[in-house]
Each structure stands twice: as structure tokens, then as C-alpha cells.
Image (tube, rainbow, N blue to C red):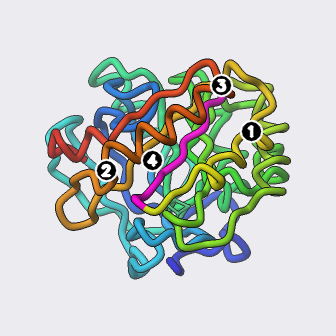
Amino acid sequence: MATLVEPSKQIDTKAGLQEIFSSIQGEGPYVGKRQVFVRFNACHLHCVYCDTPQRPAALQCEVEAIAGSGEKILIENPMTVAQVSEWIRHFALASRHHSVSFTGGEPLLYTAFLKELLPEVVPILPVYLETSGTQPDKLLEILEWVSIIAMDIKIPSATGEPMQLENHKQFYQVARSRETFVKLVVSSKTTVDEVAATCDIVTDKHIPVIIQPMTSLLTGENTVPPAKLFELESFLSRHFQDVRVIAQTHKMLSIL
Ligand code: SF4
């Protein structure tokens, strides 16, 4: 579990961040769009395909001072709302960006911070929230400033964690008032019965449903056989109008 600035210890308008940088969205229906990324530290889940829970506390945030350069400077954590909004403005002035992706970790662990930051961000760029989709009450606190929600549905055979069916159901009912898509990271062991939970969670049939094959933490390569992807896609396409299989493309491009 990442242990940085835990929610209960947030200092007013400060939060512990891992990174702020400019890159290209590598997942989901907005793949290929230039975004500013603001990556928070902590997460309450422990998905086996993610390295966030094992990361030590970041005492400094890595900030890409020149958009797209990959060169980072270190800023002391925790960072203030004013610091983060200024960096977002800096990137927006340097190059045209589609939106700001708030990612993690789990951004919704930082709602006290986001309630002050997001009103500053909205006049600069739209807010794109990447979330585990498990904390509906937290989403409600910041919903008014969010334009796009990338909601995970956590599949046990991929995450190694129990299915959070009720949390996902409640979360989707809050999220559906905004532009929302759902993303299922699947493994070679994922079954049709598992992905069928999507039918109980997502009550709108036009919502994009993204199947994302799990990639190797070491090589970044797809670990799911094509036959499995076709099986899961065929099932979900019988229930939803817009099902897509999209791998993580930023790893193919060797970008952040
Ligand atoms: S919810 Fe996201 S950040 Fe948290 S452990 Fe899972 S993949 Fe990592």
C-alpha cells in the first residue's frame, strides 16, 4: 500500500503527488489525445498488475518542466493547490492539450485537495478523472467539476482482489450524469461470468466498454491470448453497443 499523504492526514490544500507531466493518453477511447497528467500517490486497492501499492512514499513530486521532454525536476511534497494549478497552466500555455488527467493511485482519496484545485483547473482545461470506480460518495464531492470519467470495473482474476459489485453499481449511478466509459483490465484467466457483472453495473447500453488486456509489468506486452479477447468481446457486444478491445499504447510508444 502506498503510504504517502494519506487522506486523513491531508494538510488543508496540500497533497502528495508522484508526477505532473505532459503526454499522450495510452488507454481507452481517448487514446492518442495529448493530456496533462497529475498522478497522485496512494491507492486503497492492491491490483496485482499495478506497481503503485508497492511504491515507497514519494517525498518529492517529479515534474516535467518542459512539456514532452521527459526531463523531470523534483518538487517537495506535499504540493499546494496553487503550485499544481500553476503547473497545469504552464503546460496548457506550452502546447495544446485535450484535458487534464487526474490519475494515481486513486485521485478520489484526495477529494479535500481536489475540491480546491478543480475550480482552478476548469477554466484552463477539462477535467478527466481516472478512478477505480469504487467510492461513489467521494465522486459526489467533486462531480460538478468533472467532464469525463474513466471508470474501472475491477475483475478479480486480473486484480487479485474481490469484486466490488455494490460499490461499482453505486459509483456508476453517480458517474452516469457525466461523460463516462468503463474499462475492464482482463487477464488470461478472466471468464465470461466475471465480465458479466458489467451488465449489472452499467445500466446504459450505449456507454463505451473498453476491454484492456493485462500487460506484463516487465515487458509491457499483452499477456492475454487473442481467443480470450474475442470470447469476452463477443459476450459484452451482445449487451452493449460500443465494446472495444484497446491495449495500453503508451507502453508501445515508450512514453510516460
Ligand atoms: S486501483 Fe489503480 S492505482 Fe489502485 S492498485 Fe489498482 S490499478 Fe493500481
Residue type at mark 3 is Phe
- The residue at the point 45 percent across, 53 percent down is 39
Q: Is residue 162 above or below residue 111?
A: below
Q: Secondary structure at mark 4?
A: strand
> Which residue bears the numbered disc 3?
240
Q: Which circle's residue, 4 or 2, is located before the other in the chain?
A: 4
Q: Residues within 10 Å of mark 1 (few under 14, many from 20)?
A: few
Q: Which mark is residue 225?
A: 2
Are circles 2 and 3 on residues that touch, CB within 8 Å?
A: no
Give x and y (percent) for residue 40. 50, 59
* Mark 1, residue position: 199
The answer to whether residue 185 is magenta is yes
Q: Is mark 2 within 8 Å of ligand 1?
A: no
- Where is residue 34? Give x, y as percent: 33, 26
On the rendered structure, is 144 left or right of 110?
right
Q: How many marks?
A: 4
Whether residue 139 appears in magenta in the rendering, the answer is no
